[in-house]
Amino acid sequence: MHKVTVDRGELKIGDTITARVDAEKRRRTRANHTATHLLHAALKDVLGLHVKQAGSLVAPDRLRFDFTHFAPLTADEILEIERLVNGQILRNEPLDTQVHDLEAAIATGAVALFGEKYGDRVRVVSVPGFSTELCGGTHVRATGDIGLFKIVADASIASGVRRLEALTADGAFDRYQHDEALLGSLAQRLHTSPAELPGQIEQLAERVKRAEREAESLRMKLASAEASSSVDSAREIGGVKVLAQRVGNLDANGMRQLADQLAQKLRSGVVVLGLADDGKASLVVRVTDDLTGRLQAGRIVNEIASVVGGKGGGKPDMAMAGGKEPEKLDAALERSYEAVAAMLG
């Protein structure tokens, strides 16, 4: 049965028509469909007989296969699955297609899909010695027509269900060429060979980490020097020293460290630090241990965070907050003095 859309003219009962298959589209679809059968068999062989098909897509440019399994595939498992499927492709085994009674087909060990409805007579598609399934779809004449098989994605789509995406034939060849060109470009950029890329990248990553640590250390020293010079400008609110200071070029951990350093210099008091960066405001409040019975860092940070459109929390001696209105950061820092005064009564 064919369902058609008439683009021009008319179609009426009794007309003689000619149907023409898009040969190129069919060739690619066949390759992906037969590869799906091979993949299903390989998954059972590598992962176990608990693997069951839970959905699939066969398209001219790719295939997608959903199956039951409890964990992500390891790199070694993916390599073994690819090895098995490509091994069958290299054998160039002719496919065997027969029509049987349903019971006889099942008795031969043919895989039937759960939830599918089958008639009394069914079509069995086999790659002898490797895969046998009930299937009515289009397939290659021999496994060698698939050309190549390459898994390109593995993901979880539901609890206990995973999805593999793969390429065959022209798509797989294009992928290999793209990857080879990418490796060659990276190797040339790093003045090395593709085989030595992992070692070179490891060295680069270590150098970047070291440079980041050194840069962070320098930022901390600069911020500490700038902030320390302002310790003398701390205001006394109800007998408690309060220092509210804007800082820059620090991450959350750096702000906490700086707040600790300033609290030690104050000996007794409250330190409030604010940072405006990347369209966001960040706040840190540090209350020295001797004052936590009277002043709570979490209450202070929530009070001032509301000014920058945010909220936060933490422990009695240290709390943090974020906000989405960094342009109001100075107003939030100024509010810290009012918040401490209100809490001290």
Image (cartoon, rainbow, N blue to C red):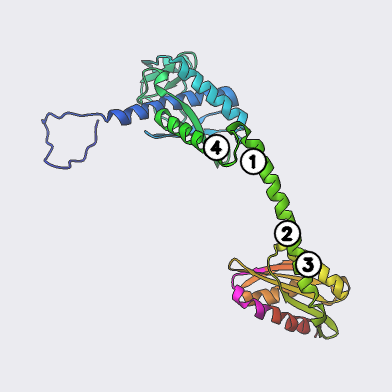
Query: Looking at this view, is 215 or 104 the one in front?
Result: 215
- Magenta stretch? 322-332
Residue 176: x, y in percent?
48, 31
Q: Determine the secondary structure under disc 3.
A: helix
- Residue at (67% x, 45% y) in the render: 205
Q: Tell me which residue sits at (69%, 42%) in the image.
A: 203
Q: Residues within 10 Å of mark 3 (few under 14, many from 20)?
A: many
Q: On the image, which quarter does residue 264 sit in? A: bottom right
- Which residue is tagged 1? 201
Q: Which residue is the site of mark 4? A: 161
Which numbered disc flags the more N-terminal residue, 1 or 3?
1
Which circle's residue, 4 or 3, is located before the other in the chain? 4
Task: Residue 258: give its label.
Answer: 3
Which mark identifies residue 216? 2
Q: Is residue 289 left or right of residue 45?
A: right
Dominant secondary-structure state across the stretch colored magenta: helix
Of mark 1 and mark 2, the one earlier in the sequence is: 1
Question: Hey, what amino acid is under mark 3?
Answer: Leu
Q: CA distance from mark 2 to mark 3?
A: 12 Å
Q: Position of residue 297 (x, y in %)?
A: 77, 72
Q: How packed is label 2: few (under 14 Cα within 10 Å), some, or many (20 or more)? A: some
Disc tally is: 4
